Amino acid sequence: MKNPAATTFRSLRSFNFRLWTLGALVSNIGTWMQRVAQDWLVLTQLTHHDASALGIVMALQFAPQLLFLPWTGSAADRLNQRKLLMLTQATMGVLALALGVLTIAGAVRLWHVYVFAFLSGSAAALDAPVRQTFVAEMVGDADLPNAVALNSTSFNAARTIGPAVAGLLIAGVGLGWAFLLNGLSFAAVVISMYFFRLSELRPSARAHRSASGFLEGLRYVWSKPDLRAILIMLFLIGTFGLNFPIFISTMAVTVFHSDARAFGLLSSLMAVGTLSGALFGASRQKSNFTFLLAGAAVFGLGCTLAALAPGYWAFGAALMIIGAAGVIFTNGTNSIMQLSAEPAMRGRVMALRVAIALGGTPIGAPIVGWVANHFGPRWALGVGAASGFTAALVAVYVLLRRRNPLHPHKDHELIV
């Protein structure tokens, strides 16, 4: 009988992946500290509980995912991924340090946050497809779904720690220190990659330089019905559902009248759910479309329960459900899309995935923020619930179409 722990953590047999996971955990704790501090800074110090301003920050932070899409995927397919990641991680670290200095000096203004959100988002737009496809170089295709899930586990383990630490820092010594510590945390990833065993990496086939590289990737994805359906589901949930900074901060401040510590605790409670979902995904051999259907439907249910929550702790419990379902869904789309794409196309496929999942935020975040301002945060959560249920209906349509003999399923590589 196989040891469940050995199955769940099998990717950690790779020295490079172990080193990466350790560095990423430190950096992710800092990232979550900054996210909470940034939301609190905008909502309570630079504005008077203005959810629309927070929506603008999110829009600027994620707009580069779409704006630079023609180049980010091609860069991931053509350039040395390890060196590119070291550059993007260092850039985001410097930006966090600069924002921290401005905040501690008392000189920060709302437009500063807007500018730093866009610059950091630009670096992240290049970083995301490279980071996701680089996982295959560290562990190989056989362990890719497990490594994706363990990456998410690290991210969400940090999510249980970072927001709570940020709440304590904000209450104890001030907002700026959360930004400074995040800036320093990026060094952990850069240093870990410096000490990689390069001989143990499994470089994927690199794409040839082509002026139509982006269009080639777009045509490739659009030619596969299942990949099209996944992108539609990602657009719905990514645009209208993954607006947690707005959902959590507006409910904490305007409904439950929480302080910084209680606000940070809500983010940590949600992280408990995402961590559970990530570990569940790591224990599975592979994801499939039925898995995506379940994740989207439960995400919609969780948002509904959160919108109806009568009190702080009930809301926190609903956030745990949202977190688990959300990470099961997003991790499933990651591994399915990578494994169904040709190695030389993976960077562009993943860039499209990230752009659709996060690039819709410039559309959805201002809308959700406007709804929260004018109708209340519970109605904003209702928008998130609708996104999950609609995405689930898309999955139902795909599964029913597969079972219809008049519409045989041609993309056999994606499993029901």
Image (cartoon, grey):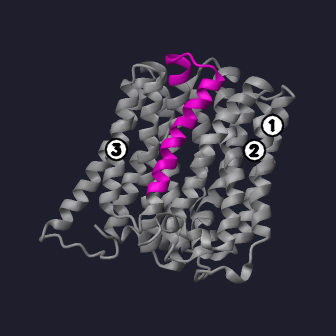
Gap in Å between the C-alphas at discs 3 and 2?
Answer: 32 Å
Residue type of the residue flagged with mark 2 = Asn
Residue 288 falls in image quadrant = bottom left
Comes first in the chain, label 3 or label 1: 1
For image coordinates 61% across by 73% down, the residue present is: 13
**Disc sitting over residue 182 in the figure:** 2
**Disc sitting over residue 298 in the figure:** 3
Write the start and end of the magenta stretch as one range. Answer: 251-280
Q: Is residue 4 magenta?
A: no
Instruction: Count neighbours of disc 2 (C-alpha within 10 A) and say few if under 14, some if 14 to 19, many if 20 or more.
Output: many
**Residue 72 makes an appearance in the image:** no
Comes first in the chain, label 3 or label 2: 2
Q: Secondary structure at mark 2?
A: helix
Quadrant assignment for the N terminus: bottom left
Quadrant assignment for the C terminus: bottom left
Q: Are marks 1 and 2 in contact (CB under 8 Å)?
A: yes
Residue under circle 1?
100
Residue type of the residue flagged with mark 3 = Val
Name the one closer to the observer, 276 or 155: 276
Judge left or right: residue 248 versus residue 190.
Answer: left
Outermost residue toward the front in this view: 1
